[in-house]
Image (tube, grey):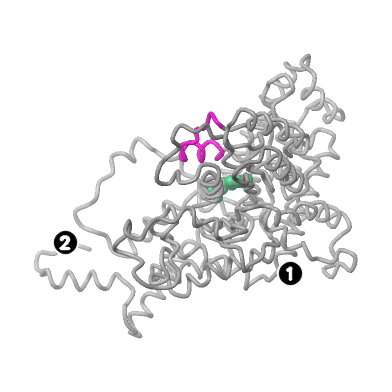
């Protein structure tokens, strides 16, 4: 708002009112708002070119950032939008065919509209009084997702939370309450509590245990096999030892779709080990099994796909991979709780994450007494705020998930996921055919390829195996770590300059048998626009950067 001496306080207030959407039906003001939105969209769309980068990458100056102050007077809407646009420069366009950076799915138009609708009315899921039918949608999504994975929707219960980390936090917290009842009020009281998980589970195992007071040092980390799955015989030994020592187990945290390799744990075996040891030690509680399926959940749309009829006419190799994944997704229903990120593999924007409990009654252990939140919950039927960690929970994530379930149906998800897998497979083949690349997650079937490049030519895979297992290859491993980092640096510079493929770097994909980190490059195909041509040029760029490194 501009400073004009003659404007009175009341006039200024009226000007300010015009900056909000009209609270009542008002044709001209509503149209004004719609035009602003259309213009803003037009402007951000105009930043797109052919590259995966929006506008141009502008290196940030954090030193200047700390000089910022709130100005005495405000700007006009158009100026603010222009200002905002300048901050969108350099963003990676998630749906671009050359964006293969991470498990970040581009958002559908329907999910973006859903977020806007929810935000327009500040829907807050803490209480149905504050979100009305969007609260209903949370219950509906929990039921739909339960049916997808095989929980009984009459028994299950789901809550949206602040991301995949939040889903793990909830799963472990509920498990902690089972192992050490009433920590919510009385704390840990000196009990030694552990979390058991694999060495390729998400690093949030340390965040969650740290914040819950279990302590990051009390995470028992189980090694994984070549497919990044927890070695269940070692799980069995370590769990037995822990129980012999009288330690309490907050949870076993399994993963369905590790962040890098798309490794999936053997859920059935893990649950069987849990059952056997709980019985053998006559534990007064059942150790909670939470499955972090924030990336892998989406593949459960294939749980009832008839591969022999193959109505979508998926190619044989894709069917082979999908059958392998299905062996695992069909076991998700054995978990006590699972995490689902719609923003990871569900094509919604951030944040849209749900933790789903097989028995919603498990959530009762998190309930707080009404008198702790006197300003809320005096009436209404649905009051998740009585047991959620969050106070305000935006309705956008729920609404976006609902929009996409409705938009795609199972078929739509099947088509997109199958396509992503086919494209990722194509990249693996192109890299392998060159002889200069070793695919590290060969035993994992998902839309992600982890690879290391070797200038030596045809022996890449053999060399990589030797580096992994044979300490006399330490120099070679370190040399190729540096080589691959410089390839990545070049690819990243090119990508940021708008001429390339946006990939990721994984510092320590696996640790060699003699303790050195093995660095890897990562391509995660999540865009439905990535086609064979995009993959061919990505492979060519990667190999050309390797030749120049
Ligand atoms: C990404 C990821 C998380 C964390 O999810 P956020 O939504 O980023 O909080 C947890 N677990 C796995 C396996 C992940 O891939």
- Dot 1 crowding, Cα within 10 Å, few <14, some 14–19, many 20+: some
Residue 308 forms part of the magenta stretch: no
Q: Position of residue 329 (x, y in %)?
A: 74, 55
Name the foreground residue: 61 vs 515.
Answer: 515
Q: Quadrant of the N terminus?
A: bottom left
In the rendered image, which residue does mark 1 sit on? 411
Residue 499 appears in the picture as rendered: no
Q: CA distance from mark 1 to mark 2?
A: 56 Å
Q: Quadrant of the C terminus?
A: top right
Name the foreground residue: 493 vs 174.
Answer: 174
In the rendered image, which residue does mark 2 sit on? 3
Q: Position of residue 280 (x, y in %)?
A: 71, 39
In the picture, measured across the screen, residue 51 lies left or right of residue 363, that is right
- Residue contact between numbered discs 1 and 2, judged by CB atoms under 8 Å: no
- Dot 2 crowding, Cα within 10 Å, few <14, some 14–19, many 20+: few
SS label for mark 2: loop
Q: Position of residue 494 (x, y in %)?
A: 61, 40
Task: Give, as a single range, the part of the protein colored magenta.
Answer: 204-218
Residue 284 appears in the picture as rendered: yes
Name the foreground residue: 72 vs 395.
Answer: 395
Q: On the image, which quarter does residue 21 sit in?
A: bottom left
Q: On the image, which quarter does residue 255 sit in?
A: top right
SS label for mark 1: helix
Label 2 residue near ligand 1, CB within 8 Å: no
Residue 91 bears which disc, if any? none
Residue name at image x 65 percent, y 29 percent: 244
Q: Earlier in the sequence, mark 1 or mark 2?
A: 2
In the picture, measured across the screen, residue 452 lies left or right of residue 161, that is right
In front: label 1 or label 2: 1
Residue at the limit of the structure toward the top, as seen here: 472
**Secondary structure predominantly adopted by residues drawn in magenta:** helix
């Amino acid at each position: 708002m501009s400073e004009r001496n003659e404007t009175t306080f009341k006039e200024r207030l009226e000007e300010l009112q015009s900056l909000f959407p009209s609270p009542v039906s008002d044709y001209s003001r509503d149209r004004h708002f719609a035009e602003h939105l259309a213009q803003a969209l037009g402007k951000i769309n105009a930043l797109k070119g052919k590259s995966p980068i929006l506008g141009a990458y502008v290196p940030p100056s954090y030193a200047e950032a700390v000089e910022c102050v709130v100005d005495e007077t405000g700007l006009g809407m158009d100026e603010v939008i222009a200002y905002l646009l300048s901050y969108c420069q350099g963003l990676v366009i998630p749906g671009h065919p050359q964006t293969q950076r991470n498990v970040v799915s581009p958002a559908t138009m329907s999910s973006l509209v859903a977020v806007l609708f929810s935000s327009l009315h500040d829907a807050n899921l803490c209480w149905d009084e504050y979100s009305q039918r969007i609260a209903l949608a949370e219950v509906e999504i929990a039921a739909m997702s339960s049916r997808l994975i095989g929980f009984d929707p009459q028994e299950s219960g789901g809550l949206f939370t602040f991301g995949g980390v939040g889903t793990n936090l909830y799963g472990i917290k509920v498990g902690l309450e089972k192992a050490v009842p009433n920590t919510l009020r009385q704390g840990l009281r000196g009990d030694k509590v552990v979390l058991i998980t694999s060495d390729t589970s998400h690093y949030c195992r340390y965040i969650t245990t740290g914040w819950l007071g279990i302590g990051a040092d009390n995470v028992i980390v189980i090694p994984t096999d070549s497919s990044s799955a927890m070695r269940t015989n070692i799980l069995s030994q370590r769990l037995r030892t822990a129980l012999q020592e009288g330690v309490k187990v907050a949870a076993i945290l399994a993963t369905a779709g590790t962040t890098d390799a798309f490794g999936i744990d053997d859920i059935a075996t893990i649950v069987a080990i849990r059952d056997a040891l709980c019985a053998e030690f006559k534990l007064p509680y059942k150790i909670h099994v939470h499955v972090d399926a924030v990336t892998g959940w989406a593949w459960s749309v294939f749980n009832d796909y008839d591969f022999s009829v193959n109505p979508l006419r998926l190619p044989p190799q894709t069917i082979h991979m999908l059958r392998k994944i299905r062996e695992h997704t069909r076991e998700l229903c054995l978990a006590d709780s699972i995490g689902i990120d719609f923003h990871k593999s569900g094509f919604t924007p951030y944040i849209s994450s749900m933790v789903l409990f097989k028995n919603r009654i498990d959530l009762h252990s998190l309930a707080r007494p009404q008198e702790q939140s006197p300003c809320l919950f005096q009436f209404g039927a649905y009051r998740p705020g009585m047991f959620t960690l969050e106070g305000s929970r935006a309705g956008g994530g729920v609404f976006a998930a609902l929009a996409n379930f409705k938009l795609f149906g199972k078929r739509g998800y099947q088509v997109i996921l199958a396509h992503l897998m086919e494209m990722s497979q194509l990249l693996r083949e192109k890299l392998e055919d060159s002889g200069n690349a070793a695919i590290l997650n060969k035993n994992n079937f998902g839309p992600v390829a982890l690879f290391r490049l070797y200038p030596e030519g045809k022996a890449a895979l053999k060399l990589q195996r030797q580096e992994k297992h044979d300490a006399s290859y330490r120099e070679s491993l370190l040399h190729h770590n540096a080589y691959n980092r410089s390839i990545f640096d070049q690819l990243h510079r090119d990508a940021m300059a708008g001429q390339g493929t946006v990939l990721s770097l994984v510092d320590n994909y696996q640790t060699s048998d003699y303790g050195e980190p093995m660095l890897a490059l990562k391509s995660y195909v999540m865009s439905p626009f990535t086609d064979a041509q995009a993959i061919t040029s990505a492979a060519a760029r990667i190999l050309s950067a390797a030749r120049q490194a």
